Image: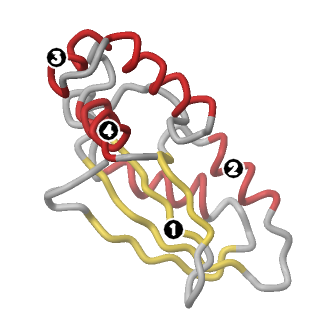
Amino acid sequence: MDEIDLQILRILKANSRTTSSDISKMIHLSVPSIAERIRKLEKNGVIDQFTVKLNRRAMGQHCIVYIFVQLDGSAETHKFREAIVQSEHVLECHHTSGEYDYLLKVALAEISELEGFIMHTLKANHNIVRSNTVFILSTLKEE
């Protein structure tokens, strides 16, 4: 991967709908060369997928929270993992090191939905020892 590939990636990261023709004009390389480089970046797994970045607030999801979750060390985690994967509110789930076992990013329409999410999705899973919720006030950078 060279500097040209990195330029292509920066452009596509900003807007994945940018055409090879437009990229070609920006970095002064032929359209076939751009298309071939993009194809190679996909083939080599550098570009995993082209996707849409949603504006959660515009979708009515005004409450974004991070929830740290600690599970009972002796309990099996498959029920917890299943519930998290099935939940439409969970945007991300990360298995972490340290005091907590998982970090969840959760999107809800309003704060009043949080109690229901905690009671029905998290606490219904009986191997949760504790959780800690952090509210997102504003976002400076997000990829």
In percent of width and height, residue 2 lies at 39, 46
Residue assigned mark 1: 103
Which of the two discs, 1 and 4, labels the residue nearer the N terminus? Answer: 4
Asked if labels 1 and 2 touch by Cβ distance under 8 angstroms, the answer is: no
The residue beneath circle 4 is 4
Inspect the image, locate mark 1, and give the three-letter code of the amino acid beneath it: Leu
Mark 1 Cα-neighbour bin, 10 Å: few <14, some 14–19, many ≥20: many
Say which quarter of the image contains residue 122.
bottom right
Q: Nearer the viewer, residue 35 or 57?
A: 35
In the image, residue 15 sits, relative to residue 120, either above or below, namely above
Q: CA distance from mark 3 to mark 4?
A: 13 Å
Q: Amino acid at mark 2?
A: Ala
Q: Residue at x 16, y 17 (%)?
A: 25
Say if mark 1 contacts mark 3, CB within 8 Å: no
Identify the mark nearer the N-term, 2 or 1.
Answer: 2
Indicate whether 11 appears above or below 6. above
Left or right of residue 56: residue 137: left
Q: CA distance from mark 2 to mark 3?
A: 47 Å
The residues bearing labels 2 and 1 have C-alpha atoms spaced at a distance of: 14 Å
Which one is nearer the viewer's eye here, 101 or 129? 101
Using the numbered discs, state the Cα–Cα distance from disc 4 to disc 2 in whole angstroms: 43 Å
Q: CA distance from mark 1 to mark 4?
A: 36 Å
| Res. 83 mark | 2
Q: Amino acid at mark 4?
A: Ile
Where 12 falls versus 137 (above or below)? above
